[in-house]
């Protein structure tokens, strides 16, 4: 879908070690006219994506092999300090010290995830206008 001239699409990165979850996210959110959705399979791919492009929202699983979500969140905060950082995880243990704007527990409906992202972006825009 075409984006009107002068309007930049919101860039969203999803990082997870489950290809089925990433595929579901990419397919379900690809129809949002104002969003460009990119997925990264695992922490290494997530770090590479953060290094190569700017993102407005980073959504990561917390518990992944090798490079976990905490590393992704720290890298996102360092390279994209204004980005909304969300955790989407199935594990409710080991959440102490997670530096994210919001933690969502799997399973999470896509409608709820979309509303959380929209709300976070709106809050961020309002804060930037002040």
Image (spheres, helix red, strand yellow):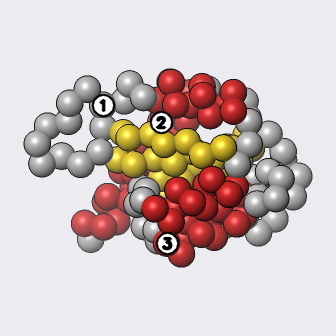
Instruction: Give left or right: position of 9 versus 70.
Output: left
Pointer 3 residue: 79
Q: CA distance from mark 2 to mark 3?
A: 25 Å
Is mark 1 in CB contact (under 8 Å) with mark 3? Answer: no
Q: Is residue 49 above or below residue 7?
A: below
**Residue 1, position as x, y percentages in the image:** 26, 26
Instruction: Identify the secondary structure beneath mark 2.
Output: helix
Circle 2 crowding by C-alpha within 10 Å: few under 14, some 14–19, many from 20: few
Instruction: Identify the secondary structure beneath mark 1.
Output: loop
Label of residue 33 in the image: 1
Q: Is residue 32 above or below residue 90?
A: above
Q: Quadrant of residue 127?
A: bottom left
Instruction: Give left or right: position of 18 versus 8.
Output: right
Looking at the image, which is closer to me, 88 or 2?
Answer: 2
**Residue 37, position as x, y percentages in the image:** 45, 40
Looking at the image, is mark 2 or mark 1 earlier in the sequence? 1
Residue plotted at (25% across, 66% down): 129
Q: Is residue 95 above or below residue 82?
A: above
Which residue occupies the extreme bottom position in the image?
Answer: 78
Pointer 2 residue: 115
**Residue 3, position as x, y percentages in the image:** 20, 36
């Amino acid at each position: 879908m075409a984006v009107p001239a002068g309007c930049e699409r919101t860039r969203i990165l999803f990082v997870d070690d489950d290809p089925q979850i990433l595929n579901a996210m990419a397919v379900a959110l690809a129809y949002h006219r104002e969003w460009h959705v990119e997925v990264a399979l695992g922490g290494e791919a997530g770090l590479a994506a953060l290094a190569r492009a700017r993102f407005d929202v980073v959504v990561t699983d917390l518990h992944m092999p090798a490079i976990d979500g905490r590393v992704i969140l720290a890298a996102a905060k360092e390279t994209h300090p204004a980005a909304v950082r969300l955790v989407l995880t199935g594990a409710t243990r080991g959440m102490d010290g997670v530096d994210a704007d919001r933690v969502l527990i799997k399973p999470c409906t896509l409608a709820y995830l979309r509303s959380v992202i929209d709300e976070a972006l709106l809050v961020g825009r309002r804060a930037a206008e002040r």
